Image (cartoon, rainbow, N blue to C red):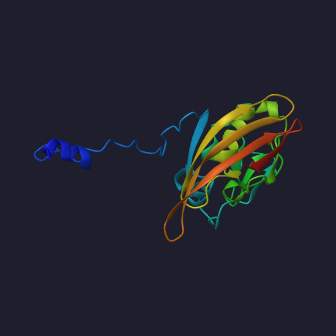
């Protein structure tokens, strides 16, 4: 049989010809690489989290993530949390460490007490209340979602980190709605990747609710 014909039938290059290189596969988004078709995206992890920032302060370290942030009257003894310092209301940040560094609290003029919702463990169709934003128009939907993700009030990772994508955001009345997807990475006896899909809704009275999808 002709050598060229035999090579074509076997799917191999003919003898003496250069090997055919496989096509390059683009790397998956990682770190600060923007995820496709996102209105905004976040790379969350140990390096710049509220937890790691607190552990760098003098005094006792948190054993684990905060389970919530109490609302407090902010004064000169409070220190703004760097992880969320760019998210402001009336020119001021909204998340602070107490003077002893033992707690992180939110400005009571902006938020009620907030309860952390771990979306890595939130099943589809299950809803959980985070708390209330006082006068939602003062902050706006996109900055609010930014704060919830960066502060880990809506926690998108459990061990290593996460990549989060804001798919849609609507501030139409009466309920504001933002849809987010992504992936978080964690270890058991090997590296694992879990999908994230959830909705953040803000009612007219400022109630913030997260629902798994």
Compared to residue 134, the image places residue 137 above or below, namely above
Vertical comparison of 58 with 213: above or below: below
Residue 170 lies, in percent from the top left, at 75, 31
Query: Quarter-wise, where is residue 169 in the image?
Result: top right
Residue found at x 66% / y 40%: 146
Residue extending farthest front: 1
Q: Nearer the viewer, residue 111 or 162?
A: 162
Residue farthest to the bottom, as pictured: 189
Q: Nearer the viewer, residue 3 or 144?
A: 3
Q: Is residue 98 above or below residue 187?
A: above
Residue located at (62% from left, 64% from top): 59
Task: Tell me what residue is drawn at x 59 percent, y 52 percent.
Answer: 49
Q: Residue at x 74, y 55 (%)?
A: 116
x%, y% of residue 137? 80, 30
Compared across the picture, whether 68 is left or right of 150 comes to right
Residue 67 is at least partly visible in this image = yes
Residue 80 seen anywhere in this rendered image of the structure: no
Instruction: List x then y, in percent, for residue 210.
Output: 77, 48
Quadrant of the image occupied by residue 139: top right
Residue furthest out toward the right: 205
Q: Position of residue 133 (x, y in %)?
A: 82, 41
Residue 57, by quadrant, is bottom right
In-front residue for pair 205/13: 13
- Which residue lies most toward the left here? 16
């Amino acid at each position: 049989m002709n050598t060229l014909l035999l090579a074509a039938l076997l799917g191999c290059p003919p003898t003496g010809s250069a090997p055919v290189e496989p096509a390059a596969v683009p790397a998956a988004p990682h770190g600060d690489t923007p995820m496709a078709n996102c209105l905004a995206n976040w790379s969350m992890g140990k390096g710049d989290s509220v937890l790691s920032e607190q552990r760098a302060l003098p005094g006792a370290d948190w054993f684990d993530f905060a389970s919530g942030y109490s609302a407090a009257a902010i004064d000169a003894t409070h220190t703004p949390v760097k992880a969320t310092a760019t998210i402001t209301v009336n020119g001021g940040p909204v998340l602070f460490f107490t003077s002893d560094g033992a707690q992180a609290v939110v400005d009571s003029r902006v938020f009620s007490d907030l309860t952390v919702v771990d979306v890595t463990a939130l099943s589809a169709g299950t809803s959980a209340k985070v708390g209330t934003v006082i006068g939602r128009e003062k902050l706006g939907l996109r900055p609010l979602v930014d704060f919830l993700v960066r502060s880990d009030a809506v926690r998108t990772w459990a061990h290593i980190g996460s990549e989060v994508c804001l798919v849609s955001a609507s501030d139409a009345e009466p309920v504001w709605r933002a849809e987010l997807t992504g992936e978080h990475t964690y270890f058991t006896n090997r590296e694992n990747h879990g999908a994230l899909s959830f909705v953040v809704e803000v009612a007219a009275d400022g109630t913030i609710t997260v629902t798994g999808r």
